[in-house]
Image (tube, rainbow, N blue to C red):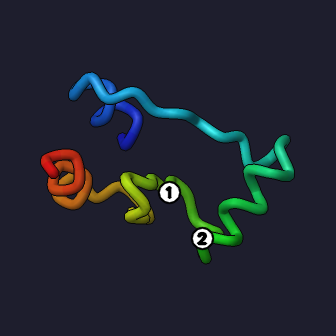
Amino acid sequence: MTEESLSDKGVTFEIKDIINDPTAMAELVEIGSLTTPVTVIDGEVVVGFNRKKLEELLAT
């Protein structure tokens, strides 16, 4: 749902494969989450799908 929501808004984003990319997994652990999806917008971390928070961060 996060990907769909961002795509619908025309937002460019990068998908990282935490299963096959140890660097991506290390980034996730560094953020302090073992749950996906995790979206980072201007340093703000959104864990899970939170449409309201994503829209709020994209509006700034």
Query: Which residue ends up furthest to the bottom in the rendered image?
Result: 32
* Residue type pointed to by label 2: Ile
Q: Position of residue 34 (x, y in %)?
A: 65, 69
Would you place residue 7 above or below residue 1 in this image? Answer: above
Q: Of 57 and 15, which appears nearest the observer?
A: 57
Q: Are marks 2 and 1 in contact (CB under 8 Å)?
A: yes
Which quadrant: the N terminus?
top left
Left/right placement of residue 6 relative to residue 32 reads: left
Image quadrant where residue 17 sits: top right
Which residue is labeled 1 in the image? 38
Left/right placement of residue 15 relative to residue 54 reads: right
Q: Position of residue 53 (x, y in %)?
A: 22, 60
Tell me what residue is drawn at x 40 percent, y 35 percent. Answer: 3
Left/right placement of residue 9 relative to residue 30 reads: left
Q: Crowding near pointer 1: few (<14 within 10 Å), some, many (20+)? A: some
Figure disc tally: 2
Tell me what residue is drawn at x 65 percent, y 40 percent. Answer: 16
Would you place residue 42 above or below residue 46 in this image? Answer: above
Image quadrant where residue 29 sits: bottom right
Q: CA distance from mark 2 to mark 1?
A: 9 Å
* Residue type pointed to by label 1: Val
Q: Which mark is residue 31?
A: 2
Q: Which mark is residue 52?
A: none
Q: Position of residue 28 (x, y in %)?
A: 66, 62
Tell me what residue is drawn at x 38 percent, y 52 percent. Answer: 41
For label 1, the SS is strand
Numbered disc in front, either 2 or 1: 2
